[in-house]
Image: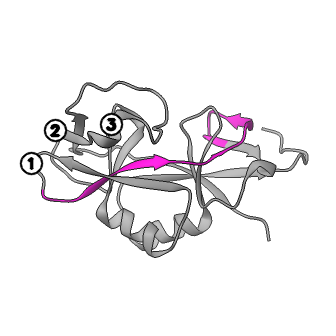
C-alpha cells in the first residue's frame, strides 16, 4: 500500500492570538536545536485573543503548539519532531515550541496554484513528521493527519503531498 503524505501549516483565523518573542530574535529558517529561542522561549501577546492549537511567531514555519496538540502526537508515538517548553506571558494555557528535526527531499515538482508538491521518496526514512529540503514545509503521514482531525485540533490546514521514486509524474 502506498504511503500518503500531507503538507500542513497554521490556518489564520479571525481574532487569533498573535505573539512575538521577548528576546530579539529574527530568523527565517527552520529552528535548530542550537537556536537561542529554545532556551529563551518566552513570548508576549502582540494582538488578538482567541487561542488555537497553533500560534505563530515571526513566520508561518515557526510556531508554538498547544498542550492538546503535543499530547495527541505523544500519545500516538509519532516521530520526527521535538517540543520545548514555551511561556506566553499572561496565559495559563500551556504551549510548546515546535522543532521539526528530519529533512526529506528535495522537492521534484511543485504546483504553486494548488500547493501540491512531489518529493524524492527514496530520502524518506519512515518519519511521521518531517520537512522538505530547502523549504519551510512541514509534512506528515496520513496517520498524523487523522489523529489531528480525530482530536478536533483547530487552525491546521492540510494539503496532499506525494513521494515519488522516479516514476512519471502527472501533467499539471
Kindly report the distance in space between the C-alpha atoms of the residues bearing marks 3 and 2. Answer: 13 Å
Say which element carries label 3.
helix
Q: Is residue 155 left or right of residue 106?
A: left
Closer-to-camera residue (134/34)? 34
Is residue 97 among what the camera can see? Answer: yes
Nearer the N terminus, badge 3 or badge 2?
A: 3
Q: Residues within 10 Å of mark 2 (few under 14, many from 20)?
A: some
Kindly report the distance in space between the C-alpha atoms of the residues bearing marks 1 and 2. Answer: 8 Å
Q: Are circles 1 and 2 on residues that touch, CB within 8 Å?
A: yes
Name above or below for residue 53 compared with residue 17.
below
Kindly report the distance in space between the C-alpha atoms of the residues bearing marks 3 and 1. Answer: 19 Å
Question: Residue 92, image x and y in percent?
Answer: 13, 58
Is residue 47 among what the camera can see? Answer: no
Q: Is residue 107 left or right of residue 166?
A: left
Name above or below for residue 18 compared with residue 130.
above
Residue corresponding to mark 2: 44
Question: Residue 18, image x and y in percent?
Answer: 23, 39
Residue corresponding to mark 1: 90
Residue corresponding to mark 3: 37
> Which residue lies at the image location 68% right of the left edge and 42% below the top edge?
117
Amino acid at each position: 500500500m502506498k504511503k500518503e503524505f500531507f503538507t500542513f501549516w497554521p490556518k489564520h483565523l479571525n481574532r487569533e492570538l498573535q505573539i512575538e518573542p521577548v528576546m530579539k530574535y529574527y530568523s527565517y529558517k527552520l529552528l535548530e536545536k542550537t537556536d537561542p529561542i529554545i532556551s529563551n522561549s518566552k513570548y508576549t501577546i502582540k494582538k488578538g485573543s482567541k487561542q488555537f492549537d497553533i500560534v505563530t511567531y515571526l513566520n508561518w514555519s515557526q510556531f508554538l503548539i498547544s498542550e492538546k496538540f503535543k499530547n495527541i502526537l505523544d500519545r500516538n508515538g509519532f516521530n520526527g519532531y521535538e517540543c520545548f517548553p514555551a511561556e506566553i506571558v499572561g496565559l495559563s494555557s500551556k504551549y510548546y515550541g515546535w522543532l521539526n528535526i528530519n529533512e526529506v527531499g528535495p522537492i521534484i515538482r511543485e504546483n504553486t496554484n494548488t500547493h501540491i508538491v512531489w518529493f524524492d521518496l527514496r530520502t524518506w526514512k519512515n518519519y511521521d513528521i518531517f520537512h522538505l529540503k530547502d523549504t519551510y514545509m512541514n509534512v506528515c503521514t496520513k496517520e498524523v493527519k487523522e489523529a489531528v482531525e480525530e482530536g478536533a485540533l483547530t487552525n491546521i490546514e492540510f494539503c496532499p503531498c506525494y513521494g515519488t521514486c522516479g516514476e512519471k509524474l502527472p501533467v499539471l
